Image (spheres, rainbow, N blue to C red):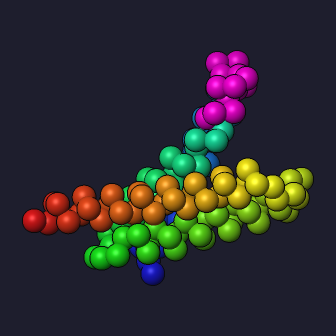
Amino acid sequence: MKKYFISLALILGLFVILSFLLTLLNYFDVLSGNLLKIFKMVIPFISMFVGSFYLGKNSIKKGYLAGLKIGIVFTFLVFIFSFLGLDKEIDFYRIIYYTIIIITSILGSMMGITKSALANS
């Protein structure tokens, strides 16, 4: 259970740090327009992949289940925060976005457990 909390903390920490850096780059007009929108979409994928890779690396078996669990928890947290904010509608694109986040989590965890298995043999 401890590895899930550490992985979730890693995901959220990386998410906050990358969002802060993106905000700084936007503030100083280094990034704007479409490039800003792209990075805004990619940040959750990067943080989810890194956190689930860590989780998979510390799992013994069934990395896809560990990735699915952490992906669902993170997606639920993002959904709740976006629902509590101003964005109260659920559309097809948002469902696809959440699905891609969960798939990224599963892939990251599977790659992490593969890396762990290769290092142990």
Quarter of the rendering occupied by the N terminus: bottom left
Where, by quadrant of the figure, is residue 38 drawn?
top right
Residue 70, x across and y down, in percent: 52, 69
Nearer to me, 120 or 105: 105
Nearer to me, 54 or 17: 54
Give the residue displayed 46% in from the left and 53% down from the top.
Answer: 49
- In the image, is 71 to the left or to the right of 75? left
Is 37 part of what is drawn in magenta?
A: yes
Q: How many marks?
A: 0
Q: Residue furthest bottom?
A: 1
Q: Is residue 52 visible?
A: no
Nearer to me, 3 or 41: 41
Q: Residue furthest top?
A: 29
59 relative to 86, above or below: below
Give the residue displayed 58% in from the left and 43% down from the top.
Answer: 43
Where, by quadrant of the figure, is residue 65 drawn?
bottom left
Residue 75, x across and y down, in percent: 64, 63
Give the residue displayed 88% in from the left and 58% down from the top.
Answer: 88
Q: Residue furthest front?
A: 92
Q: Residue furthest left?
A: 121
Is 18 part of what is drawn in magenta?
A: no
User: Which range is magenta?
Assistant: 26-39
Give the residue displayed 45% in from the left and 63% down from the top.
Answer: 106
Q: Is residue 110 visible?
A: yes
Quarter of the rendering occupied by the C terminus: bottom left
Residue 41, x across and y down, in percent: 64, 41
67 relative to 101, above or below: below
Residue 77, x across and y down, in percent: 68, 66
